[in-house]
Image (cartoon, rainbow, N blue to C red):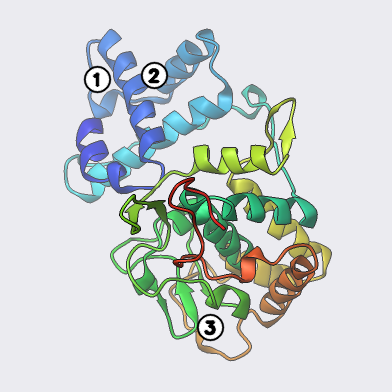
Amino acid sequence: MLTTWLAKEAARKARAQQYAYAVAHLQKWLDKLGGLTVAALTPERVQSYIDNRRGEGVTGETIQGELAALSRSLKWADLNGMIPYAPRIPRVPAELKSGPKEVEYSKEQIAALLEAAASRVDRIHIQLFTMIMLSTHARVEAVLELDASQVRDGLIYFNAPSRTQTIKKRAIVPIVPSLAKVLPTSGKVIQQWNACKDGSITGRDVFSIRKSFANCLIDAGITKGGKPWGSPNSLRHTIHTQLQRVGVPQAQIDTAAGHATDGGRTGRNYTHLRPEYLKEFCEAIESYWADLDRLTQVHRRSLIGPSLYDHVTGKAL
């Protein structure tokens, strides 16, 4: 079940690599037990997995991620008729976790990050990713999986038509003017671009940007103890905090973030058709970019163009 889920479903997700690691560790545990049926996945069995991984020095957060992969594979198998039911997988106890590590970037740091991303052709996708995250309050996976077909009528439909909404909702968010200028009109939105020797540029779909994002943080001087400070998800926390700071109604912040405030119908009702939908949210986002204008101008440039890179050095001009 795990390998089938990994091949047919998880491999297409933004966190495909993390899911592969999780499945590898889960299979190692199952092999030691001689294999298990789904019915044998009792809370006691799951606790034994937690204890086993803790004994190997693994953090509670990492173990929780592995159990999340197990839970998602079970739900997928149940939905596709592979198993008669999906047992509930307990979470890692809170006391085994190190607690939240929320990072909020200042506007100066965001400006430095955007400039670091714009300095190289093969990192321009980090610039676009950063702009979408800060303009929509979306989830990292939702942005990485976004296709241009989900952008229409002035809105971004983060939940693709073929995707079933999960507990981590994906919302419908208006496109603010600053973001509208840089969104591609076809294909996968987040692609990594590379300059070729013949003068052309080629793009490839990417579903993980942790390494490129970390390199941009280093070049921007956003480090702690010599290591990159924060992660792609830090952008979501940054804009969340900023919106609260300027007094955007919490209901609007939650709606954009995918925290359903409509009885669980986020992404399925028609409030997004109203002219005033997320009005204060959008105004605050535009005000945020206006503040960034005073620190940098790279977010106003065309993301891809013949005058943006040097074919010899591979760096943007």
In the rendering, which numbered label is found on residue 45? 2
* Residue 63 in view here: yes
Question: In the rendered view of the protein, which quadrant contains the N terminus?
Answer: top left
Question: Label 3 is placed on what type of residue?
Answer: Thr
Mark 1 or mark 3, which is nearer the start of the sequence?
1
| Callout 3–callout 2 Cβ contact below 8 Å | no
User: Which residue ends up furthest to the left in the rendered image?
Assistant: 82
In the rendering, which numbered label is found on residue 271? 3
**Mark 2 Cα shell of 10 Å, populated few (<14), some (14-19), many (≥20):** few
At numbered mark 1, what does the secondary structure look like: helix, strand or loop? loop
Q: Residue 13 appears at what percent x and percent y?
A: 35, 47
Q: Residue 144 appears at what percent x and percent y?
A: 44, 54
Question: Label 2 is placed on what type of residue?
Answer: Arg
The residue shown at (35%, 66%) is 160
Image quarter of residue 238: bottom right
Q: In the rendered image, which residue does mark 1 sit on?
A: 36
